[in-house]
Amino acid sequence: MNLKSYLALLYYRLRYKYQDLKLKLDIKIANWNKKGKERLTVMVIPHSEQKTINFHISYRAITIFIGTILVLLLISSVNVLSHSGSIHQLTELNLSNQDFIRQSAKMKEEINGLHEHVEYYHNHVGALYGRLTGDNSKVAKGIGGAEKLGLNSDKNLAPGAEVFRLKEDVHNLKVANELTQEIISILKKRKNLIRQTPSIWPVKGYVLYPYGEYLNPVTARRDFNNGLDIGAFAGSEVVATAPGTVYEIGYTRNTGYFVKVAHKFGWKTIYSNLDRVKVKANQQISKNEVLGFVGKSENSPQYSLHYEIHVGTRAIDPFAFLNQIQD
């Protein structure tokens, strides 16, 4: 058998099966139509002598009715399931919303606490900067519009005001940080100035004659004291009150041995009534280094140290530069 004959045979077989299936389907449809045209009679017989009511219903109508009921039940089931899913989603959204509200309230409390700390830090840094420099122009805080948004109130903030409060706090922190860096720089400079300023007692003792007018025990007249006379034991160590350079050492009958020290920033100190001197001219000395020892002279019959502080050529009261508590 060649290919052409085989294909022809296959074609006729398929055609036969198709016609057979079509015939069976037509028979079933005809039977269903015939069955559908058959009718059922429903009789309603009342207990009284009223007329009997007859209903004639075809099988096709019954089938359509039952099919309609089934379709409606299916649609209702789908709607119920969909509604249940929507309720579940709404419940989850409600829970999420409540959790969001709690987190928002907690965040607002943290923002308020942070704002208070920023305010405290900014105010104190600004006050310190103002005292150090006397310039309050850099201390201004805020980014503008705070009053309109109610940012100055810790409660009942306007909607979205937390964002502007955070921006304001970030700005104030930036300003406070810049002021802090300037304060550190100023303090470093002043620390160097303080380190070079005479600030300790040159000898352990007590104030015998203060700066200014006093009654001279030798001449019995009122003289002006350019420094401070500190009573002390004979031979007590006299120390430098600031680092510097010894620029003059000498002796006179009125002052005894004396040592003059030059410091930075124009400071000069003079130590008189010394019994002995331990340093040399042009020697670099440090703070608290021993310069000599307490003695006495014709003008100071008591053992004491005459101590002067000069700024340039002007003598000033040394007492203001002494620690009020001696070691």
Image (cartoon, rainbow, N blue to C red):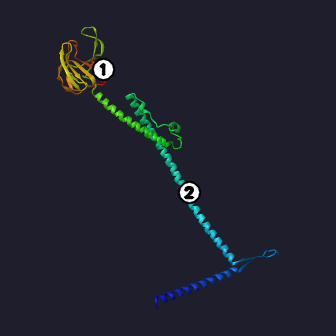
Q: Position of residue 121 (x, y in %)?
A: 41, 36
Residue lying at 68% horizontally and 75% vertically, measured from the top left: 62
Q: Which residue is mark 1?
A: 319
Q: Is 258 above or below relative to 196?
A: above
Quarter the C terminus occupies: top left
Residue lying at 49% horizontally and 43% vertically, measured from the top left: 162
Q: Earlier in the sequence, mark 1 or mark 2?
A: 2
Can you tell which of label 1 and label 2 is closer to the viewer? 2
- Rendered image: mark on residue 195: none
Residue lying at 27% horizontally and 22% vertically, measured from the top left: 267
Binning the other alpha carbons within 10 Å of mark 1 as few (below 14), some (14 to 19) or many (20 upward) gives: some
**Identity, as a three-letter code, of the amino acid under mark 1:** Phe
SS at badge 1: helix
Residue lying at 58% horizontally and 64% vertically, measured from the top left: 81
The quarter of the picture where residue 138 lies is top left
Q: Position of residue 282 (x, y in %)?
A: 18, 24
Q: Position of residue 290 (x, y in %)?
A: 20, 25
Binning the other alpha carbons within 10 Å of mark 2 as few (below 14), some (14 to 19) or many (20 upward) gives: few
Q: Position of residue 260 (x, y in %)?
A: 22, 20
Q: Which residue is mark 2?
A: 90
The quarter of the picture where residue 28 lies is bottom right
